[in-house]
Amino acid sequence: MANPLPQRIDVHSHFLPPFYRDALVATNNSKPDGMPAIPPWSPSAHREMMQAVNVRKAILSISSQGTHLWPSDPTARKNLARECNAYAAGMTTTYPGEFGFWASLPLPNVEDALAEIERAREEGADGFGLMTNYHGVYVGDEKLDPVFDRLNEIGATVFLHPDAPCMAGLNASTGVDDAGVTGALPFRDRYPIPIFEFLFDTSRAVINLFYSGTVDRCPNIKFIIPHVGGTLPPLITRFTAFGSLVPGVKPLDGERVRKQMQDQFYFDLAGTIFDGESGGRGQLKAFVEGWDISHEMLLYGSDFPFTNARAAELLANRMKDGLEHLFNEEERRAIYEENGKRLLARTGNDIRREMAVERNQKCTL
């Protein structure tokens, strides 16, 4: 019997291999981000969800709290990121065509991250899954410039995932920036962090990418921003106009930012983006109508398994109704599948060929 839901590519889909679950428990993260528990996950359960929701291909990534679980142990971060990426690469081999992956990077250590970029490319990573911050070092921080410069050189896709907001401390004896981390949570553990802190941290990170000049400097990077941009949309006018009104604040060109949003930024539809059971009202409608965001920059995301299989199916049905109120059939097909195909057009073999060319060029020099 044919699935009544449209076929789709899932760009926001997580995996939790056993060794990663063990690492979460060992670092006192058995209730990640204030959620009740680490959700169950297995390849078979993931494939069952894909069948129920009619996902043709899922791009796997590590969710918060990332692979940077140890504030003062860069070796542990490096090893966990490597192990996660190798596992995801194995999934793409075991289930060809069904899975891809956004590779994790062992940030905030830049040298380890640069090395991991090359290893993950060799394994056929579709792009890179970065957190909004790494123990308070936010994407856009000048410390991370070499990483973003390399990602720009290779024309990478960056899937940005929110993490708990943090402020970096400084160890007075060692000078290490990622020591003495302080959580920036005014309500502490009163509410699970994903309810709203995730959305704020997404906006904080994206605004920093613009203010720091990272977006200007890296025009070849494609960014995927989850949850329809979080709280970013109503802040766009404010952060672009502020510098022209207040002395001492970096001015931004509002039209340039708008164009960069339209050219470089995709937005996934994971989460509760529609208000109620029908009608198309809610977060997505406010975004696309308020900012003229093209349907060509929208992508499907399930957020499995943090959104469990039953909830993923419920939200997929709600999305089917909501998108039918906002977009025509061709536009919906683009959102569900064609935009993802375009973004993932380079195969692992393409990337490996590009790497071979780069090596040959270095040898020639």
Image (cartoon, rainbow, N blue to C red):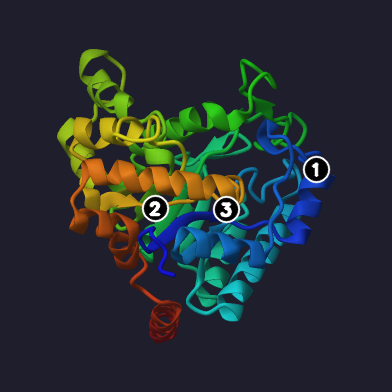
Residue type, mark 2 in image: Tyr
- Circle 1 sits on which residue? 27
Q: Residue at x 39, y 86 (%)?
A: 364
One can see residue 321 in this view: yes
Disc 3 to disc 2, C-alpha distance: 31 Å
Disc 2 to disc 1, C-alpha distance: 32 Å
Q: Residue at x 64, y 62 (%)?
A: 45
User: How many residues crowd around disc 1 within 10 Å: few (fewer than 14), some, or many (20 or more)?
Assistant: few
Q: Point out the tag, 2 or 1, that comes first from the N-terminus.
A: 1
One can see residue 167 in this view: no
Classify residue 152 as left or right of residue 19: left
- Circle 2 sits on which residue? 300
Which structural element holds mark 2? loop
Disc 1 to disc 3, C-alpha distance: 23 Å
Residue type, mark 1 in image: Thr
The answer to which quarter of the image holds residue 14 is bottom right
Q: Residue at x 63, y 31 (%)?
A: 168
The quadrant the C terminus occupies is bottom left
Outermost residue, right side: 26
Residue type, mark 3 in image: Val
Outermost residue, front side: 1
The quadrant the N terminus occupies is bottom left
Camera-nearest label, 2 or 1: 2
Q: Residue at x 26, y 59 (%)?
A: 334
Residue 110 bears which disc, if any? Answer: 3
Q: Point out the tag, 3 or 2, that comes first from the N-terminus.
A: 3
Q: Point out the tag, 1 or 3, that comes first from the N-terminus.
A: 1
Residue 231 bears which disc, if any? Answer: none
| CB atoms of marks 1 and 3 within 8 Å | no
